[in-house]
């Protein structure tokens, strides 16, 4: 399997885990402390005691993003003392430990973030934390956990309706239309609004392709394509109520001067999903090569998809 694993930049050089801070769960989090003289990390301890938790969180996040993990840990743990039930602080601590290369502590804080977000009903953080955990699982080659947590995201997302009245099943109908009539015709017939689970569908689709589970790959990749294309169609219709979608390459031509929507489509990795969908269709049933070929031809017509030509 060929998974792109992010390169972790361990910004706390030659750290030693010597200080332990107690959080609200009673479990200690070892804090990396710099020991190299030329470490880029600095520690500012003269933080006013009346700083609210949210401000400490923001300053801690800024320190993490700029690579000063020593300061980030200090500020985030102070924030956690002031706001012990805040899942955002736990999430930031998890990401700081991830940057420091300590996956165990990263997962500990991220799982606490999930628990606290669930208590508050904060779905946005629940989605974000699960995606971070999914990335860690790929680094650790824990692909069963990776698959599980992405499916948790899909289950959590109630905005993607895959079924309707009278037993209508969008997934079955869309897959049948795809195989028999092609991707463009399927997108004429069916739409799915964009949602937080789109990336989970895409990642699972690629994962299932790489593991030879082509039927499941088709199911997930189709949804990951329908969501951003449906969103792009609606964005065009906001400016032109008479617009009628006929094909993805025709939509791209309509958007060729709209950098904002084109950036959205690129960032959604919809062209990569199309490529893997064509590959999955071909492997699933070589006699349906015409369906895969239609997708390849579409990609060839779109300059933004040139890497998949």
Image (spheres, rainbow, N blue to C red):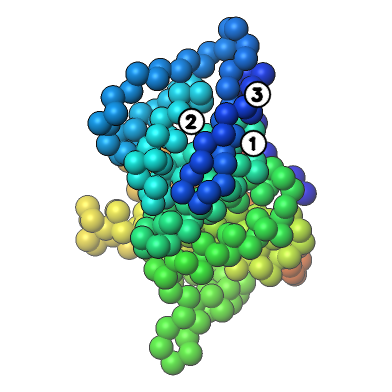
Quadrant housing the C terminus: top right
Tell me which label, 2 or 1, sits earlier in the chain.
Answer: 2
- Labels 1, 3: front one: 3
Tell me which label, 2 or 3, sits earlier in the chain.
Answer: 3
Furthest residue in direction top, as rendered: 37
Separation (CA) of disc 1 from disc 3: 12 Å
Residue linked to disc 3: 16
Question: Residue 34 versus residue 166: which sits nearer the camera?
Answer: 34
Q: Is residue 129 above or below residue 105?
A: below
Residue linked to disc 1: 102
- Whether residue 194 appears in this view of the structure is no
Q: Is residue 175 left or right of residue 237?
A: right
Question: Residue 249 versus residue 18: which sits nearer the camera?
Answer: 18
Separation (CA) of disc 2 from disc 1: 13 Å
Q: Is residue 2 above or below residue 78?
A: below
Q: Is residue 78 left or right of residue 293?
A: left
Mark seen at residue 27:
none
- Whether residue 53 appears in this view of the structure is yes
Q: At 46% across and 39% down in the image, what residue appears?
A: 92
Which element type, helix, strand or loop, lies under badge 2? Answer: helix
Labels in figure, total: 3
Are dots 2 and 3 in contact, CB under 8 Å?
no
Which quadrant would residue 82 be assigned to in this image?
top left
Question: Residue 60 versus residue 254: which sits nearer the camera?
Answer: 60
Q: At 56% across and 47% down in the image, what residue appears?
A: 27
Residue linked to disc 2: 73
Tell me which label, 1 or 3, sits earlier in the chain.
Answer: 3
Residue 74 pos. (x, y %): 45, 28
Residue 99 pos. (x, y %): 57, 32
């Amino acid at each position: 399997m060929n998974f792109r694993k992010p390169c972790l930049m361990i910004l706390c050089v030659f750290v030693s885990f010597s200080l332990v801070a107690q959080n609200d769960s009673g479990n200690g989090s070892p804090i990396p402390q710099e020991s190299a003289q030329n470490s880029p990390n600095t520690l500012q301890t003269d933080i006013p005691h009346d700083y609210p938790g949210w401000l400490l969180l923001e300053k801690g996040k800024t320190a993490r993003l700029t690579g000063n993990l020593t300061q980030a840990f200090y500020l985030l743990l102070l924030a956690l003392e002031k706001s012990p039930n805040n899942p955002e602080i736990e999430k930031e601590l998890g990401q700081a430990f991830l940057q420091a290369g300590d996956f165990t502590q990263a997962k500990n804080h991220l799982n606490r973030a999930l628990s606290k977000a669930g208590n508050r009903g904060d779905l946005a953080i629940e989605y974000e934390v699960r995606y971070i955990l999914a990335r860690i699982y790929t680094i650790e080659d824990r692909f069963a956990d990776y698959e599980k947590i992405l499916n948790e995201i899909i289950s959590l997302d109630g905005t993607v309706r895959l079924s309707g009245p009278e037993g209508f099943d969008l997934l079955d109908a869309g897959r049948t239309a795809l195989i028999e009539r092609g991707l463009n015709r399927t997108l004429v017939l069916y739409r799915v609004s964009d949602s937080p689970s789109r990336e989970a569908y895409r990642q699972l689709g690629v994962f299932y392709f790489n593991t030879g589970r082509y039927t499941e790959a088709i199911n997930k990749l189709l949804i990951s394509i329908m969501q951003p294309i449906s969103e792009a169609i609606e964005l065009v219709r906001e400016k032109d109520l008479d617009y009628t979608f006929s094909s993805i390459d025709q939509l791209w031509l309509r958007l060729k001067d709209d950098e904002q929507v084109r950036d959205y489509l690129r960032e959604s990795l919809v062209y990569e999903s199309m490529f893997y969908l064509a590959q999955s269709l071909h492997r699933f049933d070589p006699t349906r090569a015409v369906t895969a070929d239609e997708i390849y031809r579409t990609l060839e017509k779109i300059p933004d998809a040139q890497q998949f030509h």
